[in-house]
Every structure is written in C-alpha cells, then in structure tokens.
Image: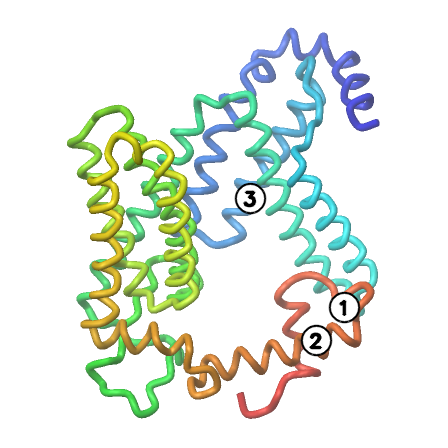
Amino acid sequence: MFNKFLNFSQNKLSYLYQNSLLLQNIDKIILPFILLAFISSTFMSSDSIGFFALIVIFLTFVKMLTKPCECFELKNFEWWLIAYFLLVVLSLCGSTLFSLSLKGFFKTFIYIGFYFSTAWYLKSNRDKIPLILGVIALCTVAESLVGFLQSFVHLDEISGWQDKTGVNPEDILSRVYGTLKPYNPNLFGGYLVCGLPAVLGSVFYFLNKKKFKITAVTAFLALLTVYTILQTGCRGAYLAMILIFGCVFILSAKFFWNTYKKWYISFAGAVFVLFVSAVTFVGALRHRFLSIFAMRNDSSNSFRFNVYNSSVEMFKDNWLLGIGVGNKNFREIYGLYMKTGF
C-alpha cells in the first residue's frame, strides 16, 4: 500500500525530479548530514545531533517521494523495529503524562527514523559504507585519545560514580569521561564500545588491502580504544567488549584459520592474556571488574537492583500499555515506586 502511494507520488512529481539538479543529486546532500550526525555526537548536545538526524530523515522522505523506482522494502529484523515503534505509539496514547511522554516519543522517532534513513541510503550507495564506518572509527579514536590523556590527570568525580567504602585509595580507578555530554564515564564507555567494532573493522579492512603499515597503526589505535574503555570503569562496557572480541574471533576465524592458523591462535591468546593480566595485576581494574559480582555488597549494584525491583512493580501496574516513553516521563513515574534513601 505504501509503495503504491510512493509510485503515485513519483509519477506526479516526475517532471519536478527530471528538472531539478538538487533532487537528482540528493544522495550527495544526504551523506554530509549523516556524517555530521556522527561527528557532532562527540561534542554537541543531543538537540543538535537530533537536528542533523532530522535533516537526513526529511531528505530521505523527499527522495522517496520524487525519485523514480524507489520502493519501501524491509528486512526481516526491521519488521521487529516497526513492531517496537507501534508499541511506542500505543504506550504514548496510554500515558498519564502525555506531554512528557510526547518528548520521549519524538526522540524515539528520530532514533528509528535516522536508522531507516541511513540504511536506506546505504542500500543504494554501498560504496559509502567504508567512509561512514571510517568516520565512526575516527570519532571513536579521537574520544579514546581524550580519555587516554584524562587517565593521567586523575580527574575529580562530578558525582558518586563508584563505591569507595573500605577500598584502598590506590585501588580506586580515576574514571575518564571524554567530551560527551552529559559527562559520565558510563555514557563514555557505552559510546566507545559501540565504536570499537568500527575501529577493529578498519584493522581488518587495511589488512585485507595488504597495507600493513596502516594496519599496524589502526591496530595500535584499537589498543588505545581498549585501554580507554578499561579506564572508563564502566562494567557494562567491559562485558560488552569481551562479547565483541569473542564475536570477532569467531567471525574472523573463517578467513584466517586455514592460512594463518598459528599466527591467529597466537594473537588471540595474546589478547586474552593481556586482558587477564590487566585485570589481575592492576589493582584498580581488578577491584572494578570484580565488583560486577559483588551483588548487594556494592552500593551502585544495590541501587540498580532497587531500580529493577521498582520497575517490575511499575510493570505490574501498567502491564498493558506501559507508562509512556522517555527518561523524563520515567523519572516522574519512578518517583512513586522508588525506595527512599538512595
């Protein structure tokens, strides 16, 4: 049905497309804004990033309405995103704090819309995939360098980021937070761990091109990113990084096992030993990593358990449509369920 509408619109606007240099080169206009959305994430506010994302969504919609033979196709997993978005719409309609939930809805719309717009662009511009991944890798490396420098400054905490009760001062990690706003090492760790696959991908990309000098440089930058992730003290990022390296090992084995089996096993073993050694012999990292398993004995863990328990109670009372969308909406409703003293 939607494709019929697109076909109707494209037929009606065919004259406009054929006589518009702007529309015929719209992909060249979309690309810079996609790149700006990623680049601006390192130093600009969410509103500014969302502005670039909205431009990408708008231009993609114009492209679909005017460019001949454009049709809307979804992969199987993308239908799950559509289903999720429909649930978000239902939750918005049933929210008791509609105005706050509406703000969260617009954010969700921009997130999902930007994903579909970027994916739509790349389907017809596959040659731009290395460029976009390269920009993501460069942004990640730039932030890693900032975090690396911060790790030698011993930054003061902006808020209570970790439980220091009964901990040797030498075992307290000076957590880095980069330039991302709001300043928070967990946010920073999540950002870096999302960009790490692009950095690792650049290593394999140049290795496949047999550009070994550049491969060595990108491998060093990947190690820099790993070091900075460790310095964030973000335990979720630690677990995600382990998962990423596990997936990289499994997927890359298909290409390297037959030809470079011994080298491959040696490299993978060296990475594993390096990580275990860092966690074992660096007291601050060891304490931070082992606190994952401290359960209620760690105050930050205990706080999260309280949030989980309260969220379950919220779900029981709002099991059909939820409470709405957005962090501000959640904060207001959560106040009715939260445990005092935290």
Which of the 4 image quarters holds residue 179?
Answer: bottom left
Q: Residues within 10 Å of mark 3 (few under 14, many from 20)?
A: some
Q: Earlier in the sequence, mark 2 or mark 3?
A: 3
The quarter of the picture where the N terminus appears is top right
Question: Do tag 2 and tag 1 residues touch (Cβ < 8 Å)?
Answer: yes
Distance in Å between CA atoms under marks 1 and 3: 25 Å
SS under mark 1: loop
Q: Position of residue 316 (x, y in %)?
A: 77, 75
Nearest the viewer among 105 and 75 is 75
Q: CA distance from mark 2 to mark 3?
A: 28 Å
**Which is nearer the N-term, disc 2 or disc 1?**
1
* Residue 88: x %, y % from top left: 74, 54
Give the label, 1 or 3, closer to the camera: 1
Secondary structure of the residue carrying tag 2 is helix
Residue 51 numbered mark, or none: 3
Q: Is residue 238 above or below residue 203?
A: below
Which numbered tag is attached to residue 333?
Answer: 2
Query: Where does label 1 land, which residue?
Result: 97
Q: Residues within 10 Å of mark 1 (few under 14, many from 20)?
A: some
Q: Which tag is nearer the camera, tag 2 or tag 1?
A: 2
Looking at this rendering, what residue extends furthest in the left direction?
213
Under mark 3, the amino acid is Phe
